[in-house]
Image: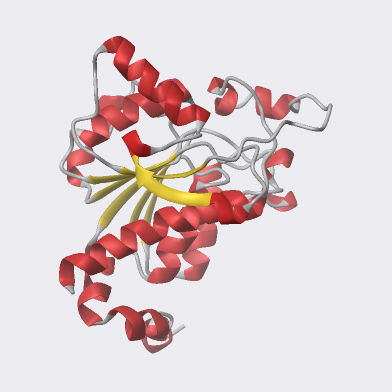
Amino acid sequence: MTMVDQASFFDRTALLVGDGAMEAFSTARIILFGTGGVGSWCAEGLVRAGITHLTLVDSDRVSPSNVNRQRMALPRTVGQVKVEALREQLLEINPAAQIEAVQAIYSEETADRFDLDSYDYVIDAIDSLKDKSALLLRASASRATLFSAMGAALKIDPTKVRVAEFWDVRGCPLAAAIRKKYRQRHTLPAKKFLCVYDDEVLPNRGGASAPAEDMASGSTSKARINGTLAPITAIFGFTLAGLVLQDLCRRVW
């Protein structure tokens, strides 16, 4: 594959956003926490647009129940480390991208491992309430611009996905639980940040319990396993990617 071929990958993006934005895309440093149904599609949206410096953080391995909604989840990748499987697929899109795969959990205990000030953007796509709350506090105090995904499970209507500042998110149980946690601890995020959310909350209609491989993975920090659909989680992920790209464009236009 020649360099000319690789350059042509982003012709349509450059046509829309211009050379200045493309330069911003190629130099921005982004770290993404959580590469599940939301994060994996966010990563794809970023790389297809021309983002070349991306760090992926997730501790899990691909399980069979991930196949219904996660970008890297295929029958052949079951059992693989998620960030490594996703990195491999993203490099098929742009072999010149510099993508770092970190198999780790972000938590209060591991927070010092990540120098958030060295990034331009922090993207939160973590499921665990405890770990998500910790990341939002640390990231909001960093120099990086923060974007976060609230709960994407128990939803089916794609027209209900929207964006709001964290304190203005309504109808999302996860956002409400995080805000309650902060108020109880008298600790608030250091700055405002935008969230992708959806106020639709449907019941689980199936009777099956969570698969054993899910219960054994890092995602067990979730209070419960809820049903999800790829169209919704992908819209969440692509919206997160879009917020980053839009912010970069605004800085150069």
Q: Is residue 76 above or below residue 253?
A: above
In the image, what residue occupies the spot 24% across and 64% down? 248
Which residue is at the front of the view, 225 or 199? 199
Question: Residue 250: image x %, image y %?
Answer: 21, 67
Please give left or right for residue 150 compared with residue 211 in the image: left
Which residue is at the front of the view, 71 or 163? 163
Q: How many marks?
A: 0
In the image, what residue occupies the spot 42% across and 64% down? 47
Which residue is at the front of the view, 86 or 35? 35
Please give left or right for residue 230 compared with residue 81 in the image: right
Question: Residue 132: image x %, image y %?
Answer: 40, 29
In the image, what residue occupies the spot 55% across and 34% down? 60
Image quadrant for the C terminus? bottom left
Report whether residue 109 is seen. Answer: no
Which residue is at the front of the view, 122 or 6? 122
Point out the residue furthest to the top here: 184
Q: Is residue 115 above or below residue 177?
A: below
- Please identify the quarter of the rendering in which residue 200 is found: top right
- Please identify the quarter of the rendering in which residue 131 is found: top left
Point out the residue furthest to the right here: 207
Question: Residue 211: image x %, image y %?
Answer: 75, 28
In the image, what residue occupies the spot 32% across and 11% down? 184
Point out the residue furthest to the bottom here: 4
Q: Is residue 224 above or below residue 160?
A: above
Question: Residue 96: image x %, image y %?
Answer: 37, 69
Please give left or right for residue 153 compared with residue 175 in the image: right
**Colouring of the image:** secondary structure
